[in-house]
């Protein structure tokens, strides 16, 4: 590497002073800022021309998209970009000065001041009511958006109406209708443009990925097709477009909902401006009002619906995360209990076995005819202690390990083998080796099966039993049968904790537990639950 000092004298770059370096940075930032201002001015002007191109007469525009463009820019990137809105306003109003329907200069200045106030007030209120760069993923945020826009557009409508009255453009009898038309035009335009900007501008790539699917393509086609159909007919069928809006809100959240709103509003205004559709036959005032109310209702209904759907999805995700954390805490607690049992109760049982053997050996050394009752009692104590020790080892192993780590059927088979060894009950287990079930679902189903087998051992007096596991189209079935004494399954069994435990576990999986039993004819415990799949494998 050649350093600055090693370069020939004529080729050495002069080291900048701190003041010069700061000036260069300021010039660079100034150029970027100027480019941003000009880009915003161009976007504002383009939105204004779009609104003017779709006006119903020379002076009546159903919606005014620049309101949404300006508020979105100042809300997302800061109030320092207001000169871009001002430049765009100056260009638009400059064209109006030379238009054949030119307005008085004072009226134009009042209109421009109102529009600038609308943009600034809307951005400030939006930041206060919903926060900085917030998504419209909550109903209260959509409500905050509506309040902010309602107040901001009222400022513009009031300033514009006042300036038109002062300039003699309208008279007092027209003021209320003029104000309403202005306010609804700005509000409708902002409801179409601003939510789209909030949903797409912060993360455009993620928004595009969500829409760039076959279903997204069909949704867009449905929004266009239903909108065109609704406004190709003169009858009152404008709301045929709503199924596409509902589809977009449910399946694509605010990303798809805002895009569908833009499509629906564009079709409605475009067709009506070209004398087509159910609103076109109405007088100009009612035509404008019908279009504005239609767009506002469609936008607000879709935005609130998408927000509620997003809230539901977020609540489900949070609940799943809470359950995962609870499962993790439960597993840690199980491991702790296993360690405590190993260090205390298990050791005590082991010591009891040793002391029992010592007592038996001492009794045998006393003479050839030890006390038969005492020897039998010691034998019974030793046997019971060894059984308790075996049960404790099994419990410690289960608490310290994931019972279904090698699958539900394998866990049930292992548990049945232990019952066969301890109690001599023949249990047949059948089912696929692997199921596409989440660990939580497998654990709950295993516990249901274990409880059912425990009831057979304790109460049924059965000679054999069977466990059948089956998966079918998103559902999983676990069935436990026995040939025991049975019971009256129609009767209530208050206080039977085992049955209630099985029913509650099945309910947590979105399933139902049924018990079929007749005295002397055995019992069938059947649980069918959601598969709750994770990843693909055999079975479900």
Image (spheres, grey):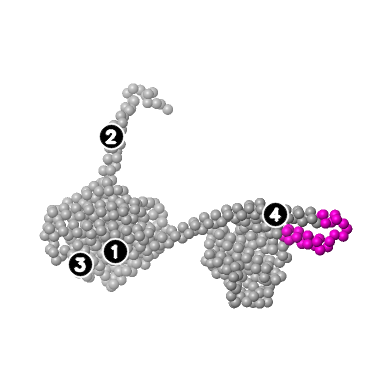
User: Which circle's residue, 1 or 3, is located before the other in the chain?
Assistant: 3
The residue beneath circle 1 is: 296
The residue beneath circle 4 is: 348
Majority SS type along the magenta span: helix
Q: CA distance from mark 3 to mark 4?
A: 92 Å
Percent coordinates x, y for residue 200 in the rendering: 35, 54
Percent coordinates x, y for residue 344 in the rendering: 66, 53
User: Which circle's residue, 3 or 4, is located before the other in the chain?
Assistant: 3
Question: Can you tell which of label 4 and label 2 is closer to the viewer?
Answer: 4
Q: Observer-nearest residue: 456 or 30? A: 456
User: Which circle's residue, 1 or 2, is located before the other in the chain?
Assistant: 2
Q: How many marks?
A: 4
User: Which circle's residue, 4 or 2, is located before the other in the chain?
Assistant: 2
Element marked by disc 3: helix
Q: Quadrant of residue 12?
A: top left
Question: Can you tell which of label 3 and label 2 is closer to the viewer?
Answer: 2
Element marked by disc 4: helix
The residue beneath circle 3 is: 285
The residue beneath circle 2 is: 23
- Quadrant containing the N terminus is top left
Segment tinted magenta in the rendering = 361-387
Percent coordinates x, y for residue 303 in the rendering: 35, 61
Whether tag 3 and tag 2 are in contact, CB under 8 A, the answer is no
User: Which circle's residue, 3 or 2, is located before the other in the chain?
Assistant: 2
């Amino acid at each position: 590497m050649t350093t600055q000092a090693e370069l020939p004298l004529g080729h050495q770059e002069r080291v900048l002073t701190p003041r010069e370096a700061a000036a260069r940075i300021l010039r660079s930032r100034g150029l970027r800022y100027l480019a941003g201002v000009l880009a915003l001015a161009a976007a504002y002007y383009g939105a204004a021309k779009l609104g003017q191109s779709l006006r119903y007469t020379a002076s009546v525009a159903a919606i005014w998209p620049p309101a949404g463009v300006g508020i979105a820019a100042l809300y997302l990137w800061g109030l320092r970009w207001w000169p871009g809105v001002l430049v765009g306003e100056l260009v638009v109003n400059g064209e109006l000065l030379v238009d054949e329907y030119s307005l008085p200069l004072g009226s134009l200045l009042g209109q421009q001041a109102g529009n600038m106030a609308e943009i600034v007030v809307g951005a400030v209120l939006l930041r206060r009511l919903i926060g900085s760069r917030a998504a419209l993923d909550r109903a209260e945020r959509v409500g905050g958006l509506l309040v902010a826009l309602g107040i901001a557009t009222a400022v513009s409508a009031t300033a514009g109406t006042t300036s038109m009255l002062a300039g003699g453009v309208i008279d007092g009898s027209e003021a209320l209708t003029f104000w309403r038309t202005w306010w609804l035009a700005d509000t409708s335009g902002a409801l179409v443009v601003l939510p789209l900007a909030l949903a797409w501008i912060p993360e455009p790539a993620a928004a595009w990925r969500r829409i760039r699917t076959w279903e997204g393509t069909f949704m867009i086609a449905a929004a266009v097709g239903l909108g065109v159909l609704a406004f190709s007919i003169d009858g009152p069928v404008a709301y045929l477009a709503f199924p596409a809006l509902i589809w977009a809100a449910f399946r694509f959240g605010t990303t798809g909902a805002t895009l569908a709103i833009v499509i629906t509003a564009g079709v409605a205004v475009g067709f009506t401006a070209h004398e087509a559709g159910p609103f076109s036959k109405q007088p100009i005032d009612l035509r404008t009002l019908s279009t504005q109310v239609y767009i506002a209702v469609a936008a607000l209904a879709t935005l609130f619906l998408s927000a509620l759907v997003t809230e539901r999805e977020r609540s489900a995700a949070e609940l799943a995360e809470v359950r995962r954390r609870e499962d993790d805490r439960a597993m840690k607690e199980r491991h702790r209990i296993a360690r405590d049992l190993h260090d205390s109760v298990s050791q005590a049982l082991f010591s009891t076995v040793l002391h029992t053997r010592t007592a038996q050996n001492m009794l045998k050394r006393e003479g050839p005819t030890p006390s038969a009752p005492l020897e039998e009692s010691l034998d019974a104590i030793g046997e019971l202690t060894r059984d308790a020790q075996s049960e404790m080892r099994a419990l410690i192993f289960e608490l310290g390990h994931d019972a279904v780590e090698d699958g539900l059927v394998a866990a049930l088979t292992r548990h049945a083998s232990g019952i066969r060894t301890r109690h001599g009950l023949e249990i047949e287990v059948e089912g696929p080796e692997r199921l596409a079930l989440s660990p939580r679902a497998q654990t709950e189903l295993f516990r249901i099966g274990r409880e059912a087998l425990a009831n057979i051992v304790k109460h049924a007096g059965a000679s054999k039993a069977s466990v059948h596991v089956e998966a079918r189209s998103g559902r999983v079935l676990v069935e436990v049968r026995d040939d025991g004494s049975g019971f009256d399954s129609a009767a209530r069994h208050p206080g039977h904790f085992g049955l209630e435990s099985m029913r509650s576990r099945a309910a947590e999986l979105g399933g139902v537990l049924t018990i079929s039993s007749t005295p002397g004819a055995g019992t069938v415990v059947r649980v069918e639950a959601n598969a709750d799949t994770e990843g693909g494998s055999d079975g479900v």
